[in-house]
Amino acid sequence: MTVQNLDTDITCRRMLESDLPAAHQLSQAVRWPHRLEDWQFVHRLGDGFVAERNGEVIGTAMCWSHGSDYASLGMIIVSPEAQGKGIGRGLMESILDLIGERNTLLFATPAGQPLYERLGFKAIGTVHQHQGTVVQPEIVAPPSGERIRPVGMNDRAKLIELAAGGTGMPRAMVLNALLQVAEGVVIDSSGELTGFALMRRFGHGYVIGPVVAPDPERAKAMISYLLEARADSFVRIDVHDSGQLSPWLQELGLLQVDSVVGMVRGEAPVPAFGLQQFAIINQALG
């Protein structure tokens, strides 16, 4: 599909796998850390559009479905030299037409928030980006009678259930993809899993997320376990402000370098009682 967009030399069309090297270069131009492999991962799970001028990709936007009722948006970039020409809005309108009536989530930078508000999105929370190298993390023990262990081959169904409970959205597609590329741990209480955390290669090193747990202390226990496994490596983790993990992460040496605003168009999903997603997968998939 090709749609004329504003200037006659700019078109908006569906994103192809062959566009990913150009999309990666575009993200480098705006100083995003994503590797080509990170683009390939999110593209396999979603759909998107590119804005193109004279054969050159100058803008991107992507979306992902989470069941029949929810979707998320991300990877929204416009080349610095092409900003201010309505390209971002054109890409957003194309994506929103594709999504249809689904309740839609995104994370907004301060620069992008006014556009999203005009398109019907409202703020619902804040996510803080932390990153750095932890030399010797302080290990947080789980509650008495519980243990932290690596994710096992038979844990998949329970992790999908916990992920859905922590976000209020179906997560089977995303979790199945993550478990192919991530390592992780669970909290095991006499055979009952009450939380999990995953870590995978991303950007300049590793990223931790999602982290789903009943409370901050169990979330800290799993995060500290993963950090110990990657001591002296560069690690990023994006956490919800409501989870109150930022001060602890700062103390560990994972400095807060940015914050984004969570927004929704429609109704926000409601997590299961007693369960919370403390760290997101990334700012595209939530």
Image: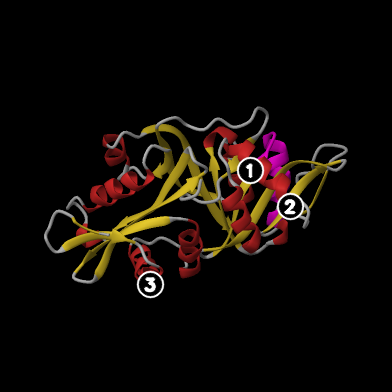
Residue 131 in picture, x, y percent from top left: 54, 54
Report the amino acid beneath label 3: Ser
If you read the primary sequence from the N terminus, does the residue marked by circle 1 or circle 2 appear first?
A: 1
The kind of secondary structure element at disc 1 is helix
The residue carrying mark 2 is: 185
If you read the primary sequence from the N terminus, does the residue marked by circle 2 or circle 3 appear first?
A: 3
Q: Is residue 111 left or right of residue 177?
A: left
The residue carrying mark 3 is: 18
| Of residues 165 and 260, the one drawn nearer to the viewer in this rendering | 165
The kind of secondary structure element at disc 2 is strand
User: Image point 33% across, 42% down: which residue?
Assistant: 110
* Dot 1 and dot 3 residues touching (CB under 8 Å): no
Neighbourhood count class around disc 1 (C-alpha, 10 Å): few under 14, some 14–19, many 20 upward: many
Residue 48 in picture, x, y percent from top left: 37, 56
Neighbourhood count class around disc 2 (C-alpha, 10 Å): few under 14, some 14–19, many 20 upward: many
Q: Is residue 255 left or right of residue 225?
A: left
Magenta residue span: 212-227
